[in-house]
Image (tube, rainbow, N blue to C red):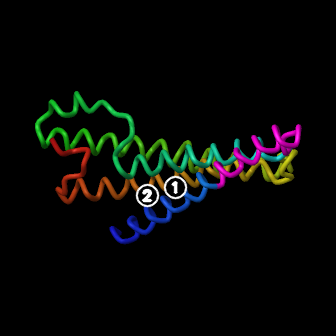
Amino acid sequence: MNHFVEVARRLLELTLLMIFLVLIADVLWGVFTRYAMSEQARWSEELARVMTVWLALLGAALAHHKQEHLGIGLLVDMLHQDARRIASAIVQLLILGFAISVMVWGGGWLCIERLESGQLLPALGISKACTYLAVPVSGSLISLFSIHHLISLTRNIESPETQG
């Protein structure tokens, strides 16, 4: 599983880099067209919004993999090493539960509803589901990384979160 998670992490980092580069190019194009051509390209603001949603949600998945998400480290750091491991496992189970129930399941239904409704982004002419798809994709990655962290904890391998 370590190899699979490592490949997923690398693909995620590459995807985030590509999204960021597209976002930069899009914003620069929008600024250029606004000032050089007196009217901003209609699609540039909409594309920037979609790219920002994807960047934020996939970035959250990467932050979770690297254990750089927000947490109450001060309280956990005061615990004994075994208690830290238990607290870390509880946190991973809570994150896994949220990711599966809200992000994967709920986000998946939201995406399906947008597809069935036929709602389109007006300037880009694509389905709004493309934006909402970021939620279940990110939730799936967060779930994968939570399972990996839980397996590491059960094997008594110290993850960055449990090191003191």
User: In the rendered structure, which segment of residues is drawn in magenta?
Assistant: 22-41
For disc 1, the marked residue is: 140
Q: Which disc number belongs to residue 144?
A: 2
Disc 1 residue crowd, few under 14, some 14–19, many 20+, Cα 10 Å: some
Q: Residue flagged by tag 1: what amino acid is it?
A: Ser
Q: Residue at x 22, y 33 (%)?
A: 76
Outermost residue toward the top in this view: 75
Residue 66 or 97: which is nearer the viewer? 66
Looking at the figure, which quarter contains the N terminus? bottom left
In the rendered image, residue 145, in percent from the top left (x then y), is placed at: 40, 55
Say if mark 1 contacts mark 2, CB within 8 Å: yes
In the rendered image, residue 117, in percent from the top left (x then y), is placed at: 84, 47
79 lies left or right of 126 = left
Q: Residue flagged by tag 2: what amino acid is it?
A: Leu
Can residue 147 be found in the magenta stretch? no
Label 2 SS:
helix
Q: Which residue is drawn at 38% across and 66% down?
A: 6
Main SS, magenta residues: helix
78 lies left or right of 56 = left
Residue 21 or 101: which is nearer the viewer? 21
Residue 69 or 17: which is nearer the viewer? 17
Q: Which disc number belongs to residue 4?
A: none
